[in-house]
Amino acid sequence: MADGVIHQLNTSQGGVPKLPVPSATIDELGVVGDRQDEPEPMHGGPLKALCLFSLEVIEKFAADGHPIAAGSAGENVTVRGLDWSQVVPGARLRLGDQVQIEITSYASPCKKQTRWFSDGNFARLNARVNPGNSRAYAKVLRGGTVQPGDPVRFEQPDPTGSQ
């Protein structure tokens, strides 16, 4: 039984919004073919290879009148049905049957996300200001291919330290 599912996979050639793709190959640097306007250290690199966000958080913002949608905030993986309060640094997840990731940090909001909030207050995405509503960065422990509808499961770290 999955804890959640991949709702949407998103890429861009830089900037936001990231647009949906039917499947994605993920390696140690993230989604193959995805680009960031401001790469390392701001975005990307092994510790920020993937950006994840919760569809339920996006829908909550949209219900409050903000023009945000899946991919708008720059996430590569939009998940649904996952207990987002458990997506914290150190948490390990399996995406589909192949991909294993570890959450490394919360993603800081960016002024480029201003347009997704009717009052321009993109700090709604800040983990310190608005806990539980932030995107999360992850490193890739094992790559592979995923598609929307694939399960997302929490995993326990291997106590031996091997992956």
Image (cartoon, rainbow, N blue to C red):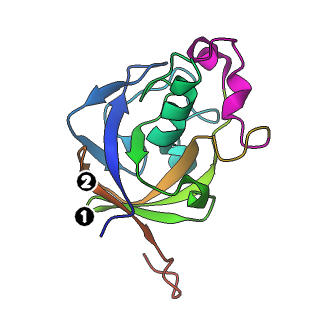
Mark 1 closeness class: few <14, some 14–19, many ≥20 residues within 10 Å: few
Q: Give the residues in magenta.
A: 110-128
Rendered-image quadrant of the C terminus: bottom left
| Image side of residue 131 versus residue 29, left or right | right
Q: Which residue is drawn at the image coordinates 38% and 23% (left, top)?
A: 12
Q: Which mark is residue 97?
A: 1
Q: In the picture, residue 66 is in which quadrant? A: top right
Q: Residue furthest bottom?
A: 160
Front residue of 135/132: it is: 132
The magenta stretch spans residue 141: no
Q: Which residue is drawn at the image coordinates 32% and 37% (left, top)?
A: 8
**First reached walking from the N terminus: tag 2 or tag 1:** 1
Task: Give x and y (percent) for residue 31.
Answer: 35, 40
Rendered-image quadrant of the N terminus: bottom left
Question: What is the secondary structure assignment of the residue under circle 1?
Answer: loop
Residue 143 lies, with reference to residue 107, above or below; the image says: below
Is any atom of residue 54 visible in this view?
Answer: no
Amino acid under disc 1:
Asp
Question: What is the secondary structure assignment of the residue under circle 2?
Answer: loop
Q: Are marks 2 and 1 in contact (CB under 8 Å)?
A: yes
Residue to which mark 2 is pinned: 150
Amino acid under disc 2:
Asp
